[in-house]
Image (spheres, rainbow, N blue to C red):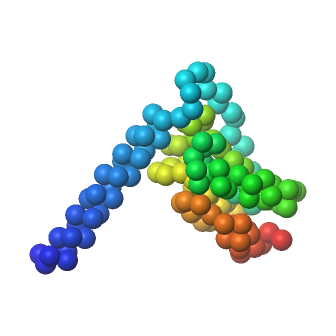
Amino acid sequence: MTACERFHQGAKRVTGIALAFLVIVLSLAGPAPGPARAEDFSHVPVKGMVTMIDLGATECVPCKMMAPIMEKMVKKYQDKAAIVFIDVWKNRDQVSRFGIRAIPTQIFYDATGREVSRHVGFMSEAAIVEQLTKMGVK
């Protein structure tokens, strides 16, 4: 095995460990102690409608940066696409349901409920509009 191959193998191992650590932190971290108010997201993705789900937390910095963009998307795509924010610190059951490894994560579903695209990290307004346009939403 070459030095380059050993480096890449080690990098993959470190990445896997880092992702596992992040999942553990996400499951333990969150807002101040108190009863969590889980919401019902059983209707998500919305049947018969293109759906974008932004999974994050109100206290996560990149998530906070996306909040005004998400508000704008909700208004812009009202009755055209379902735009949903799920706070995974308040709704921890959604982490495993949607296979979240880091936040924010955006998942796009077609009208049949099939996952079409997934993005991890901050997503710009232009990138969201581009994805929704690719999916036929105007």
Residue at 61 percent across and 26 percent down: it is 36
The reply, left or right, for residue 36 in relation to residue 112 is left
Q: Is residue 93 visible?
A: no
Q: Nearer the viewer, residue 85 or 49?
A: 85
Q: Nearer the viewer, residue 82 or 2?
A: 2
Q: Where is 138 relative to 30, above or below?
A: below
Q: Nearer the viewer, residue 112 or 43?
A: 43
Q: Where is 126 relative to 85, above or below?
A: below
Give residue 42's position: percent from left, percent from top: 68, 40
Give residue 6's position: percent from left, percent from top: 17, 70
Image quadrant in which you'd find residue 74 = bottom right
The reply, left or right, for residue 102 in relation to residue 12 is right
Q: Is residue 31 visible?
A: yes
The reply, left or right, for residue 24 in relation to residue 129 is left
Give residue 106's position: percent from left, percent from top: 61, 57
Q: Where is 37 relative to 66, above or below?
A: above
The reply, left or right, for residue 121 in relation to residue 40 is left
The N terminus is located in which quarter? bottom left
Residue at 72 percent across and 43 percent down: it is 43
